[in-house]
Amino acid sequence: MEKTKILFTVIILAFTTSAKAQELKLEDYLLNYDYESRIEMKMQSKNLIQLLKDNEAQLVDIRFEEEYQSWNMPIAINIPLADLPNNLEKLDKSKLIVTACPHKDRAIIAMIYLKTKGYEVKYLTDGLLGLAGNLRGDNAYDFIKR
């Protein structure tokens, strides 16, 4: 319960900036949040793999640089969460942006931030660990050979 309180406090503090015309105010996002919004914010690895194969999505690994250097997925770009506001130009607005970390805590924060900036965005529900599990053996071969 304490982790949840901290997470929401961080989210609220992170999004107290003013919004541009195409951007969405965090307050408006929250006021309109419903069950459909809850479904729309999520992406599973199996679905992401096909979108990446079709060049319709961009995977953003929002872990710290040291974590990324330790192990990474070459199909993702690394923009650490704290650097995200200063690196929006690296994102392809014509694609679905999918944020990811090993689990999902930082990916959710990044997803909400990008949503308020006008991006079509989801977070990876099974995280990078789930994606790695789905890209083994024949699945990896099929993905790389397209």
Image: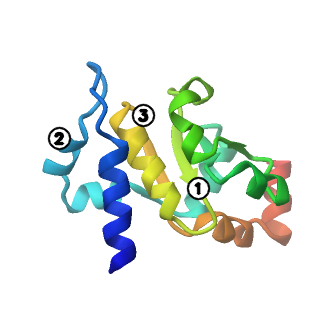
> Secondary structure under badge 1?
strand
Quarter-of-image position of residue 91: top right
Location of residue 11 in the rendering, given as x and y in whole percent from the top left corner: 35, 52
Q: Could you tell me if residue 108 is visible in this image?
A: yes
49 horizontally vs 125: left or right: right
| Residue lying furthest top | 21
Amino acid type, mark 3:
Tyr
Which residue is under mark 2? 28
In 3D space, how far apart are the residues under numbered discs 1 and 2 (Cα atoms)?
24 Å
Q: Could you tell me if residue 92 is visible in this image?
A: no
Q: Quadrant of the N terminus?
A: bottom left
Which residue is under mark 1? 100
**Residue 42, numbered label:** none
| Residue lying furthest bottom | 1
Q: Measured along the vertical axis of the image, is residue 83 above or below residue 123?
A: above
Quarter-of-image position of residue 71: bottom right
